[in-house]
Image: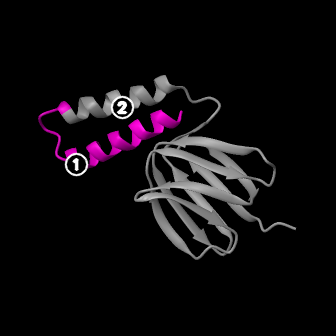
Amino acid sequence: MTNKFDLTIISAESKVFEGKVENILVPGMVGDFLVLANHAPCISSIRPGFLEFSEGTSDKQKYFVSGGIIEVINNMVSVLVDSAVSGEKIVKEDITNLISEVDERLSAADTINKDDLGLRKNDLEEALKQA
């Protein structure tokens, strides 16, 4: 028998996934990290990138997320994201459009959070390589 835990992924638009999984690979702010059953409690920010999880089959489900947070408590994992698009549906053009939006904001004279936007652009460019 495998160790599974409850996973809920919610975007601003809808509930994306709810079920039992064996693992989830998360694009954390300082690098990707893996959550397994009985993981220590934690809360972390999520950067733009690909979230992957397995329900116990050899197939992994993959979603592009634009950022959010994850909470792990007592084998219950909640992922709240701005948006989530199935890895099968995401196209490079979608990520390229997000990069263009960040570039526009970076070029605006009144932008005050250029460092944060620069990091977001780097994360999106890395996700583009994985798409």
Extreme residue in the top direction: 93
Instruction: Please report the residue visible at 25 percent of the width from the left and 29 percent of the height from the top.
Output: 104
Quick one: 125 or 116, which is closer to the camera? 125
| Magenta: main secondary structure | helix
Query: Which residue is drawn at the image coordinates 68% and 59% (left, top)?
Result: 23
In the rendering, at what x and y percent does residue 91 appear?
54, 26
Q: Is residue 33 left or right of residue 18?
A: left
Answer above or below: position of 12 versus 93. below
In the rendered structure, find residue 115 and report the number of the disc placed on it: 1
Relative to residue 40, is residue 116 drawn left or right? Answer: left
Q: How many marks?
A: 2
* Figure quadrant of residue 4: bottom right
Res. 130 mark: none
* Crowd tier of the residue under label 2, counting other residues whose Cα lies within 10 Å: few below 14, some 14–19, many 20 or above: many
Instruction: Name the amino acid type tagged 2.
Output: Ile
Question: In the rendered structure, does residue 126 fall within the stretch colored magenta?
Answer: yes
Tell me if 43 is positioned left or right of 8 in this view. left
Q: Nearer the viewer, residue 33 or 19?
A: 33
Residue at (71% x, 53% y) in the render? 18
- The type of residue carrying mark 1 is Asp
